[in-house]
């Protein structure tokens, strides 16, 4: 593995390829260099369920110095002590569903007849066609790449203003309604 001492700038600069150095002051905190020249600060910890987690704090360089990364490692370990799992939360954010995927799920349910109106009847095909058109022309271009959980009231208001101003308007005939 690597040595066990207080990590400093010189240690980072002299770290060999595919090696790691571990800090003696903060348990589980270290720096590693993989095959590239980039050095990353890492933290290994155990969750409340006794699962070992590997968390990358960041790449060496602005803003991450050994002292700043050590301070962040202590902060993360404090969260872990209260039962949090920062690595799992980071993974969940990375794999969060976006608005495009939510629209696709909505239309899959609509095509299967699982979308019901207030009267508990399936939506009419003309309504679904209109919904698809609105999603493809307005929702997906303006909000599609955003994670569903990160969409705020301000995002919706700016979306409504953008649609009203015609930012997503397309001048094309779409044919008769309901056909």
Image (cartoon, helix red, strand yellow):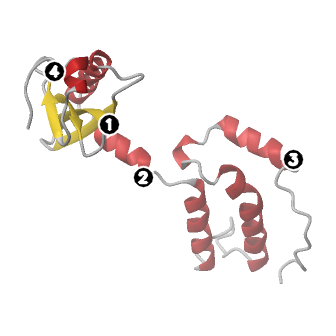
Of 13 and 84, the residue lying toward us: 13
Q: Nearer the viewer, mark 1 or mark 2?
A: 1
Q: Which of marks 1 and 3 is nearer the N terminus?
A: 1
Location of the N terminus (image quadrant) = top left
| Foreground of the two, 142 or 107 | 142
In this view, which residue lies farthest toward the bottom?
179
Q: Is residue 83 above or below residue 118?
A: above
Mark 1 or mark 4, which is nearer to you? 1
Which residue matches tag 3?
A: 164
The quarter holding residue 115 reads bottom right
Mark 4 or mark 3: whose residue is earlier in sequence: 4
Cα separation, mark 1 vs mark 2, equals 25 Å
Count the labels in the image.
4
Nearer-N-terminus badge (1/2): 1
* In front: label 4 or label 3: 4
Residue 85 in sight from this viewpoint: no
Task: Estimate the spatial distance between the alpha carbons at disc 1 and disc 3, rounded to whole Å.
Answer: 47 Å
- Report which residue position mark 2 lands on: 95
**160 left or right of 84 in image:** right
- Mark 2 / mark 3, whichever is N-terminal: 2
Foreground pick, 84 / 72: 72
Q: Position of residue 53 (x, y in %)?
A: 20, 41
Query: Are discs 1 and 3 less than 8 Å apart at CB?
Result: no
Which residue does the numbered mark 1 point to in the structure image? Answer: 38
- Decide: few, some or many residues near mark 3? Use Cα within 10 Å; few <14, some 14-19, many ≥20: few
- Give the class, few, some or many, for how many residues have Cα within 10 Å of label 1's Cα (few <14, many ≥20): few
Question: Is residue 44 rendered to the left or right of residue 149?
Answer: left
């Amino acid at each position: 593995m690597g040595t066990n001492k207080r990590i400093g700038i010189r240690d980072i600069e002299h770290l060999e390829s595919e090696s790691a150095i571990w800090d003696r002051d903060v348990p589980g905190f270290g720096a590693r260099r993989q095959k590239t020249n980039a050095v990353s600060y890492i933290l290994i910890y155990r969750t409340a369920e006794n699962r070992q987690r590997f968390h990358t704090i960041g790449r060496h360089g602005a803003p991450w110095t050994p002292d700043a990364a050590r301070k962040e490692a202590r902060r993360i370990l404090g969260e872990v002590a209260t039962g949090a799992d920062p690595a799992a939360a980071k993974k969940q954010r990375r794999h969060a569903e976006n608005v495009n995927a939510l629209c696709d799920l909505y239309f899959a349910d609509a095509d299967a007849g699982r979308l019901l109106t207030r009267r508990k009847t399936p939506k009419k095909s003309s309504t679904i066609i209109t919904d698809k058109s609105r999603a493809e022309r307005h929702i997906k271009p303006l909000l599609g790449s955003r994670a569903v959980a990160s969409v705020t009231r301000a995002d919706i208001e700016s979306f409504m203003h953008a649609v009203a101003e015609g930012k997503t308007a397309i001048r094309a005939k779409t044919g008769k309604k309901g056909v």
